[in-house]
Each structure stands twice: as C-alpha cells, then as structure tokens.
Image (cartoon, helix red, strand yellow):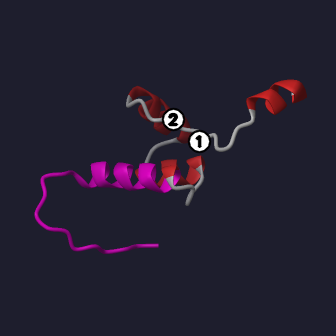
Amino acid sequence: MNISVNLPDINIAEQDLKFLLAVKLLEEGIVSLGKASEIAGYSEKAFVEILLHKGIAPIKYQNLDLDTELSNA
C-alpha cells in the first residue's frame, strides 16, 4: 500500500519518518514487530537492535501477572 501525506516543511529524512511511524504503530499494538520492521525498512533483527539501542522495548507486556507467570514456568 502506498500512502501520500502532505507535511509542512520539516527537516527529517524519509527513512526517519518511516522508522517513527513503525515505532508508533508497534507501540499502539496496531502492527506486529515483523510488520513494523518491514515498514521501517529493516530486517527484524536490525530493527530490534535499533529499538534496544534507543531504549525502546521491542515487546510490550501488558497486564502481566508476575506471580501467575512464575507459577506457570
């Protein structure tokens, strides 16, 4: 799918915009890690490494019940 968006004149590279979009979609749970890496234009491994380097968790844990998880381990 191709989407065209008119933005005000900002000093940011297209690759950076793709990365930021991918991160936001991933954080919102709209896309998977694999799809986010595809949007950003990186392999999944490279995308995860970049996320970790930037301090962004590649996996989002929600409503984690640690006691239950530990008892199931």
38 to 6, vertically: above or below: above
Inspect the magenta stretch and tell me whether residue 7 lies in it: yes
Q: Position of residue 35 (x, y in %)?
A: 55, 54
Q: In the image, is residue 47 above or below residue 38?
A: above
In the picture, the disc for residue 57 is: 2
Q: State the image coordinates of residue 2 (x, y, percent, origin top left).
A: 40, 73
Q: Residue at x 39, y 56 (%)?
A: 21
Which label number is shown at residue 60?
1
Residue range highlighted in magenta: 1-26
The type of residue carrying mark 1 is: Lys
Q: Nearer the viewer, residue 50 or 73?
A: 73
Which kind of residue does numbered mark 2 sit on?
Ala
- Give whichever of 39, 59 is nearer the camera: 59
Circle 1 packing at 10 Å, graded few (<14), some (14-19), many (20+), is few
Secondary structure category for the residue under label 1: loop
Q: Is residue 5 above or below residue 60?
A: below
Query: For the point 13% across and 58% down, which residue is it?
Result: 10
Determine crowd level at label 2: few under 14, some 14-19, many 20+ residues with C-alpha closer than 10 A: few
